[in-house]
Image (cartoon, grey):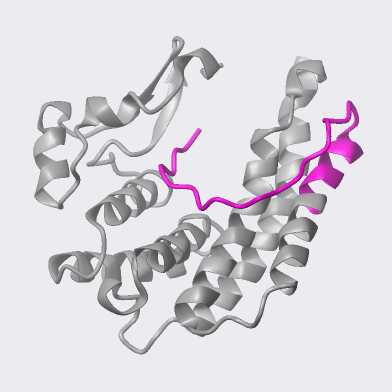
Amino acid sequence: MLAFGLLIQATISVANPSPSLTGFQQQIRDAYVAVEAAQSKKPPAKDASEQLIRLGERDQAGRIAYQQLDFSQVPENQRTAWRTAIFSEITRHDKIYQDELKSLIPAEGWFKLSVYGKEASRAAFLIVQHAVNDTTFMKSVLQKLEKFVQQGEAEGQLYAMMYDRVALEFDQKPQLYGTQVKCDDGKWGAYNLLEPEKIDERRKSIGMTQTYQQYLAMFDNSKCP
């Protein structure tokens, strides 16, 4: 499981889980419909920052609903197939939101904190962090984030999360900041980590305020499968 560390809050009504695959899939679709309907009742976004925040809410809708699904009634030998089928709906929406985000990216290549604000910048980041279908896009944004962090125009935590994900999933390199975790022997922890003894030094160097152990304390080991 990959940890993103950040969630944009959205008010979504999710029905009790159905024991059928189609029921689970419908809950994901309903979550997107609900947040889109809620946004349609609002006045048009007043600026790009508000557009990004709303886009981020839509991006999170399916994932919040997915986290609420109860797979305990699903036969263990079917769970992987069910999760894959259900997540295909989320992926379909991800691609739509990626295209919308690309149309909003300014000439300088990313959203400066001083111009767009933290909430909008985080919303945009999450959409790119989910763009595992578009490696070129993720890597181009990662380069911009590195530059913007140095200028104080992006959060170091966001750069670290994207760096670690790209390193692990696409470059076959170890992660540097310990942001990507998985369950191992009943505990959450970073995997394939370069020089673990230097992790807090690296985190501090890009402005991350949490130590690695403080970060891990955010994860509930009781939910570690």
Q: Is residue 55 above or below residue 130?
A: below
Magenta region: which residues? 1-29
Q: Is residue 183 above or below residue 28?
A: above
Q: Is residue 212 left or right of residue 36?
A: left
Q: Nearer the viewer, residue 210 or 177?
A: 210
Image quadrant in which you'd find residue 143: bottom left
Image quadrant in which you'd find residue 84: top right
The image shows residue 107 at horizontal and vertical percentages of 35, 89
Looking at this view, name the residue that lies furthest to the top: 185
Q: Is residue 25 left or right of residue 220?
A: right
Q: Nearer the viewer, residue 50 or 41?
A: 41
The residue that appears at 34% across and 70% down in the rendered structure is 117
Residue 144 lies in the magenta-colored region? no
The residue that appears at 45% across and 69% down in the rendered structure is 137
The image shows residue 6 at horizontal and vertical percentages of 43, 47
Q: How many marks?
A: 0
The residue that appears at 69% across and 61% down in the rendered structure is 93
The image shows residue 127 at horizontal and vertical percentages of 51, 61
The residue that appears at 15% across and 51% down in the rendered structure is 207
Q: Provide the major secondary structure of the magenta segment.
A: loop
Q: Is residue 159 above or below residue 168?
A: below
